[in-house]
């Protein structure tokens, strides 16, 4: 059984002070839920996450990591630093990093490897732009991205890898893939993982959907057999909405 994961991606929102207050309020209001809550926050909010969330069952992590181990890389943050901050997960290959920072599949694979070396589970994002979907190439595009981004990545066990399928045209746009379209792509991703690793591995890996997930569409998406939760941007910023997403994952 794969436990549903509801991972918030705060992007570049909330100061450390705001994050601290939000985490405290989350713990105060958290109902008993079967889903796993997780929050991917700015680097600057990770110390607050460690102080307040460590040991509570609410996982946290970063939104990116350096592909380098250590050294003269101004502005970079290493996997070892994230491990020391208690990160369980960290996003790699988000489309905003691919688009605005020119990140290639090869770089994304290097980042995933660095995380695994430091006991952090990568949440690896893939997904097609609108042109690929309109041309009928969504599956080929997404699986090719997956192949490149997992080149040389050997997680060992399925709980050491999370895939997020995020069609680029659905991120922050209010347009969501239909549960049927998302389910079809998740099925393709799982079959591909079975060939790349093994059927048992593919069966255990969580494949999240991301792209304008909101409280009113989450339940229908999370109910699909191959959708194991969500990577959620906008709707993870408001505590009321985030709590509704956790409830939708029942
Ligand atoms: C994301 O940040 O990965 C995302 C899917 O954003 P949104 O939910 O706002 O579309």
Image: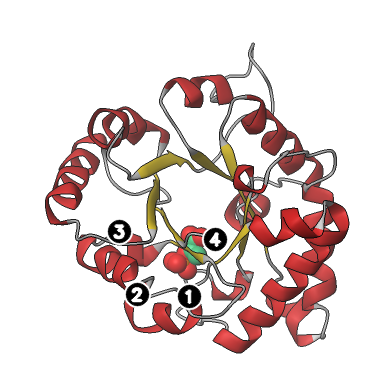
Q: Position of residue 39 (x, y in %)?
A: 38, 48
Read off the residue under disc 4: 2
Tags 1 and 2 in contact by the CB under 8 Å rule?
Answer: yes
**SS assignment at label 1:** helix
Residue shown at the point (73%, 53%) measured from the top left: 201
**SS assignment at label 2:** helix
Read off the residue under disc 3: 237
Between marks 2 and 4 in the image, the one whose residue lies nearer the viewer: 4
Q: Position of residue 97 (x, y in %)?
A: 61, 49
- In which quadrant is the N terminus drawn? bottom right
- Pick whichever of labels 2 and 3 is earlier in the sequence: 3
**SS assignment at label 4:** loop
Read off the residue under disc 1: 222
Q: For marks 4 and 3, give the CA distance.
A: 25 Å
- In which quadrant is the C terminus drawn? bottom left
Residue furthest top as drawn:
71
Tags 2 and 3 in contact by the CB under 8 Å rule?
Answer: no
Residue 41 sits above or below residue 76 on the image: below
Residue 91 sits above or below residue 189 on the image: above
- Of residues 107 and 73, which is closer to you in this image? 107
- Pick whichever of labels 2 and 4 is earlier in the sequence: 4
Q: For marks 3 and 1, give the CA distance.
A: 19 Å
Q: For marks 2 and 3, give the CA distance.
A: 16 Å
Residue shown at the point (19%, 36%) measured from the top left: 17
Residue shown at the point (71%, 39%) measured from the top left: 155
Residue shown at the point (81%, 60%) measured from the top left: 194
Read off the residue under disc 2: 248
């Amino acid at each position: 059984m794969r436990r549903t994961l509801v991972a918030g991606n705060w992007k570049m929102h909330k100061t450390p002070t705001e994050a601290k207050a939000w985490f405290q309020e989350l713990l105060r209001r958290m109902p008993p839920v079967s889903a796993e809550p997780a929050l991917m926050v700015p680097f600057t909010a990770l110390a607050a996450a460690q102080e307040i969330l460590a040991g509570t069952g609410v996982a946290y992590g970063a939104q990116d990591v350096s592909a380098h181990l250590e050294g003269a890389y101004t502005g970079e943050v290493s996997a070892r630093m994230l491990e020391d901050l208690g990160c369980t997960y960290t996003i790699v290959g988000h489309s905003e990093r691919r688009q605005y920072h020119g990140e290639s599949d090869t770089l994304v694979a290097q980042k995933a490897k660095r995380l695994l070396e430091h006991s952090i589970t990568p949440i690896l994002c893939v997904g097609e732009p609108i042109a690929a979907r309109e041309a009928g190439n969504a599956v080929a595009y997404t699986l090719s991205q997956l192949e490149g981004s997992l080149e040389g990545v050997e997680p060992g066990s399925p709980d050491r890898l999370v895939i997020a399928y995020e069609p680029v045209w659905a991120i922050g746009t209010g347009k969501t893939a239909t549960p049927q379209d998302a389910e079809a792509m998740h099925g393709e991703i799982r079959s591909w993982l079975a060939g790349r690793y093994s059927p048992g591995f593919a069966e255990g890996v969580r494949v999240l959907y991301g792209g304008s997930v909101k409280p009113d569409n989450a339940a229908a998406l999370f109910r699909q057999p191959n959708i194991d939760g969500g990577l959620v941007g906008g709707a993870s910023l408001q505590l009321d909405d985030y709590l509704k997403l956790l409830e939708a994952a029942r």
